[in-house]
Image (cartoon, helix red, strand yellow):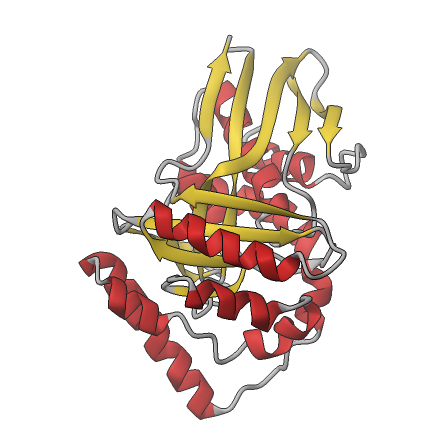
């Protein structure tokens, strides 16, 4: 194999009650990447379409992730990465994770799969940390493994893939303003009250239980963020109104996608997810801000191979 084309999807991290540990993979939005072997060792960024990203290999998260992989598994050939960037950087739906995860996945395929998908996460983290300023895998894990994932430990990358309730759909609205993760992390407090931490632990445990038991009502009750949302929500225009509209339209729960500004909702069934999206749109249309709306099932596969040669 000398060339591979992949679809590397967007993702929702934190999922209200799981800051830095919980995430899920989307199916209807993502980047396309073509990675080719070259005769010259090293990594280069080729063509870039869609959104703008750096072409310097030391500043692009995709090439930085691949360079990390090649430190462990040297190769006589090099690699060129062409990117059709459909996920806007700073959108809150895992733009940097899609680039980093997609690049290491593709290079791993071209090298004959020396690493498992789980093992690729540590290399992708080199790129993700460049973009976000933090070492966390809650976006990377669902992109590489698919579905819902729980990061028990970022330090040891102890990651658990979780089941997906069959009727679960996501609605994501993305106001076209940029909110970088590194900035949205800066407003967070270093300490939290014990009672808030206990509530958060309870919600996270209940959410995971709901995934295993297909208990949509329990899932709905557990989608509360007592720790992060109160601070980050002030950075997102009409957040409270959009969330309220989603819940009033039948969403099981709603919250900030990643570090924002995107807002997500989970619903039981596609028709409710569409209704929720319409209500979220109505609120955001009151402002002079462009936006994108995505309705998606939960992507159980993660990165997908489109073609190879």
Q: Is residue 176 visible?
A: yes
Reply above or below: 145 against 78.
below
Q: Is residue 119 visible?
A: no
Side (left or right) of 133 relative to 139: right
Reply above or below: 23 against 253.
above
**How many marks do you count on the picture?**
0
Outermost residue, left side = 213
Q: Position of residue 299 (x, y in %)?
A: 39, 40
Q: Position of residue 209 (x, y in %)?
A: 24, 65
Outermost residue, top side = 309
Q: At 44% from the left edge and 45% from the top edge, which residue is drawn?
A: 25
Q: Quadrant of residue 286?
A: bottom right
**Viewer-side residue, 132 vs 51:** 51
Q: At 43% from the left edge and 91% from the top edge, which residue is drawn?
A: 195
Q: Position of residue 284 (x, y in %)?
A: 64, 59
Side (left or right) of 285 relative to 273: right
Q: Quadrant of residue 97?
A: top right
Q: At 73% from the left edge and 39% from the top edge, which residue is drawn?
A: 60
Q: At 27% from the left edge and 58% from the top edge, which residue is drawn?
A: 211
**Viewer-side residue, 214 vs 184:** 214
Q: Position of residue 82 (x, y in %)?
A: 68, 23
């Amino acid at each position: 194999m000398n060339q591979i084309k992949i679809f590397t999807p967007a993702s929702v991290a934190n999922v209200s009650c799981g800051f830095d540990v919980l995430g899920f993979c989307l199916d209807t939005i993502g980047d396309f990447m073509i990675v080719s072997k070259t005769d010259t060792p090293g990594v280069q960024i080729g063509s870039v379409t869609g959104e703008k990203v750096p072409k310097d290999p030391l500043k692009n998260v995709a090439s930085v992730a691949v360079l990390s992989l090649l430190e462990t598994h040297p190769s006589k050939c090099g690699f060129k990465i062409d990117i059709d960037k459909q996920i806007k950087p700073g959108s809150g739906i895992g733009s940097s994770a899609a680039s980093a995860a997609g690049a290491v996945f593709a290079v791993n395929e071209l090298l004959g799969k020396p690493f498992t998908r789980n093992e690729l996460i540590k290399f992708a983290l080199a790129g993700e940390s460049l973009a976000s300023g933090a070492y966390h895998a809650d976006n990377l894990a669902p992109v590489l493994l698919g579905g819902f994932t729980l990061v028990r430990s970022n330090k040891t990358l102890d990651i658990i893939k979780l089941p997906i309730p069959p009727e679960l759909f996501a609605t994501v609205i993305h106001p076209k303003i940029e909110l970088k993760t590194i900035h949205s992390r800066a407003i967070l407090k270093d300490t939290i009250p014990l009672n808030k931490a206990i509530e958060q632990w309870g919600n996270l445990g209940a959410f995971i239980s709901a995934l295993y038991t297909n208990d949509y009502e329990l899932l709905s009750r557990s989608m509360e963020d007592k720790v992060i949302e109160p601070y980050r929500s002030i950075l997102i225009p009409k957040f409270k109104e959009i969330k309220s509209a989603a819940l009033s339209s039948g969403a099981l729960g709603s919250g900030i996608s990643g570090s924002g500004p995107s807002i997500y909702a989970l619903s039981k069934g596609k028709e409710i997810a569409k209704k929720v999206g319409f209500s979220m749109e109505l609120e955001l249309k009151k402002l002079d801000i462009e936006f994108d709306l995505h309705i998606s099932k939960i992507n159980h596969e993660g990165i997908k191979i489109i073609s190879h040669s």
